[in-house]
Image (cartoon, rainbow, N blue to C red):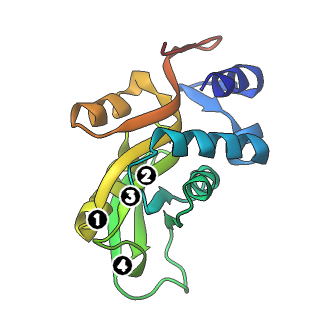
Amino acid sequence: MRALEEKILQEGKILPGNVVKVGGFLNQRLDVEFLMEMGQEIARLFEGEQVNKVLTVEASGIALAVTAAAALHVPAVFAKKHASANLSGDMYTAEVYSYTHKKSYTIMISRDYLTADDRVLIVDDFLACGNAVKGLMQMVDEAGATLVGVSAAIEKGFQGGGDALREKGIHVESLAVIDSMDDHSIQFRA
């Protein structure tokens, strides 16, 4: 999605440690109109796949997942990272290591929200090493649901997570793939 690449170059910031800060439009301050365009593009990329549920992990993936779900006319579900009073009953859980936060989380979803009848599209803001996606895939598998594919706004191709999923035969569509970056520049996959 050329428009996303341009927005990353214009509004994003490169931080030490191969971090791309896009909080000004994607995951803290939300450019809602642009997010809706991204959600429509994800829906187009998975058209005909009979997706009936979009799945993500809190918190930064929720906005994009909701726009994709809206464009697909299906519910969005997110895995929580922290237990709370409103979480009860039987849960799917998985351990996920966050590259950004340098810590592990136990993510959880009520078994009521993910079932064997679901055709699931996993959507997240970033795909780097693929740890969040692997945790969500574990839950999809445990539920007996069908994984239709994975979509990310920004894939850090140089970290290999997306390519590893593709090698396993998983349909992965990232809207922008960064092949390399340094302190001053970003190179996108052609």
Image mark for residue 122: 2
**Taking 90 as reference, is 9 above or below it?**
above
**Taking 187 as reference, is 80 above or below it?**
below
Q: Earlier in the sequence, mark 3 or mark 1?
A: 3
Q: Are marks 2 and 3 in contact (CB under 8 Å)?
A: yes
Q: CA distance from mark 4 to mark 3?
A: 14 Å
Q: CA distance from mark 3 to mark 1?
A: 7 Å
Reading the image, the residue beneath label 1 is 145
Q: Residue at x 35, y 66 (%)?
A: 118
Q: CA distance from mark 4 to mark 2?
A: 17 Å
Q: Earlier in the sequence, mark 4 or mark 2?
A: 4
Q: CA distance from mark 1 to mark 2?
A: 12 Å
Label 4, secondary structure: give it.
helix
**Taking 89 as reference, is 175 above or below it?**
above
Reading the image, the residue beneath label 3 is 120
Q: Amino acid at mark 2?
A: Ile
